Amino acid sequence: MKNNTTTVRNLNHQEQTLTNDKTTNNMHPDLHHITELFRRNFGSQRIQNEVTTQRLQGQLKELVRVSDLDLPNHQQLRAIVRRIRMTYDSVRLLAVAEEENGVVVHPERSDQRASALMRRHGLWLNRDKTIIGTIPGVCIGDVFFYKTELAVVGLHGQPEADIDYIPGSVSSSGEPIATSVIVSGGYENDVDQSNVIVYSVYGGEDKNSRQVFHQKLEGGNLAMERSMHYGIEVRVIRSVQYEGTASVFDKVYFYDGLYKIVKSWVDSKSGFNVYNFKLQRIDGQAKMDCVVFNPRCVLSLDISKKKENVDIRLVNNIDRNHDPIYFEYLPRAIFPHFVLQQSGGETGCECINNCVDGCFCFIKNGNEFPYSQNGILLKGRPFIFECGPLCRCPPHCRNRVTQKGLKHRLEVFRSRNSGWGVRSLDLIQAGTFICEYTGIVLTREQQQIVTMNGDSLIYPSQFAENWAEWGNLSLIDTSYKCPSYPSIPPLEFAMDVSRMRNVACYISHNSTPNVMVQFVHFEHNNVMFPHTMLFAIENIPPLRELTLDYGVADGDLSG
């Protein structure tokens, strides 16, 4: 068991000692393999329209374009990007915990610390080659909460600027080439018409983003013009002002795909010259989920019948199936009566305003809090003890997260691939609680009776232990060990969902899911019967399907 002080000391030690490390030898085998994949698959694919000139002295950056990846390689690269993003979040959340606990005061933001530490460990992807166009493992619609994370995955390498480009001094053409642009609407004459963007380049603004000087065709502006001249595509990341019901962020970043720069001109706005570029989205690319969504048949505005905090819509655009309407909605699992009986020896914390270090519930969780002040799960663990009915702390206590219920607008929809599926109408940040997986909880003896009737059961013990991935710092700290405390006893109960269930029962199976199971205890004193709570293990964009690893082989579980 490690307390927060030990964890903080480990992170600070990593930051202090790794500045001069040779990261290639310390690279995780998966990352070494991706480097070899990049070299083997992409090293000879030069940009066809790149101008070839006499090579300059020194190290020049070779432009490569990735295309025609087969499915196994795509899945492997996607999994590696997923692992890198979870490591980034794990480091960032560790820094958040340090700041919240007052253990360390750091001049950099938590995301900046995570980005810098990963770079010193050689964990920034796509740094040895400058990839034009698609970044392997990043999909259209992927969402990011920080510019620094865009740099970590190689999507946009300059967090401080809206245009990422290769300077002419290291380009084999001797000219700057733009690779990506963040479209934020931050300039007074930006125009965004979905597949066509009129982008006003940066430069000449004051601190209030008002144009006060003439712009010059240099730096990123010149790189955009050169990319247009040579017909080189750029990646577009959309910066969106987000006003979701359960998000604390006012701006997020969506990857929108590849665009060609088709036109440039100079305008006079606010009395000063401003360079403009017209970007046209390349045909044949996938659309972001929020763009293609167009429900035609809403069967129910709320299948929970007001039993949840927010409505859960039911949509079927495919056939006449109405099955989810006919089940009794169950917002919380129903345990056997004997489980809820208190023995009389129970106790809770004595906290008045909020739980504090050293309180009863803090100690039960291994001398640390499982959640941040904003309710984000800091790391997965076998078991979480939330504050319960015997605790004196108020409902807004940081250690009461899952018991507050659903906060995101979920939707059950008919899917051609999985029967029924679930998606969110809101953006869900990684580490966020989504909902409980509910049903009628059965003992081993009750299970035998129910299965004789042919009813299907859900066995929580069979869910994959994806919680072990969340907070995993093994790519950063070679001495990292997966949490083993609080330990969880053997789970022998099952859940009958044949008549009573909730929205979670329609989540589809996937062996690389974006949702994980975390067992949580708060309602009673019997640790053999925890709640089966679901958390996001990835940032989930609006309308992307939620998936869960049921612990079965792909294809063995139908929706």
Image (cartoon, rainbow, N blue to C red):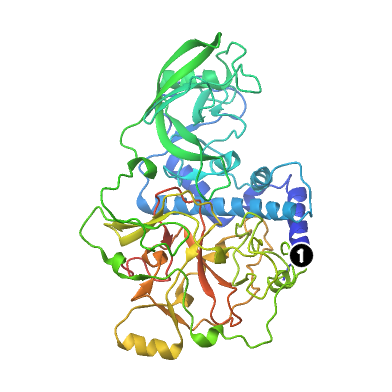
- Viewport quadrant of the C terminus: bottom left
Q: Amino acid at mark 1?
A: Asp
Q: Residue at x 59, y 79 (%)?
A: 524
Which residue does the numbered mark 1 point to in the structure image? Answer: 357
Few, some or many C-alpha atoms within 10 Å of disc 1 (few <14, some 14-19, many ≥20)? few
Classify mark 1: helix, strand or loop.
Answer: loop
Relative to 228, 364 lies left or right:
right
In terms of image quadrants, where is residue 285? top left
Instruction: Identify the residue at horizontal 63%, vertical 64% (top origin).
Output: 395
Residue farthest along the front direction in this orientation: 306
Q: Who is closer to the viewer here, 219 or 413? A: 413
Q: Quadrant of the N terminus?
A: bottom right
Front residue of this view, candidates 87 and 517: 517
Q: Residue at x 76, y 64 (%)?
A: 357
Residue 447 in the image, given as x and y percentages of width and height:
40, 86
Query: In front here: 230 or 199?
Result: 199
Indicate the position of residue 361 as horizontal and vertical percent values: 70, 71
Instruction: Say above or below: 440 vs 4.
Output: below
Q: Residue at x 30, y 86 (%)?
A: 453
Against 134, is 441 above or below?
below
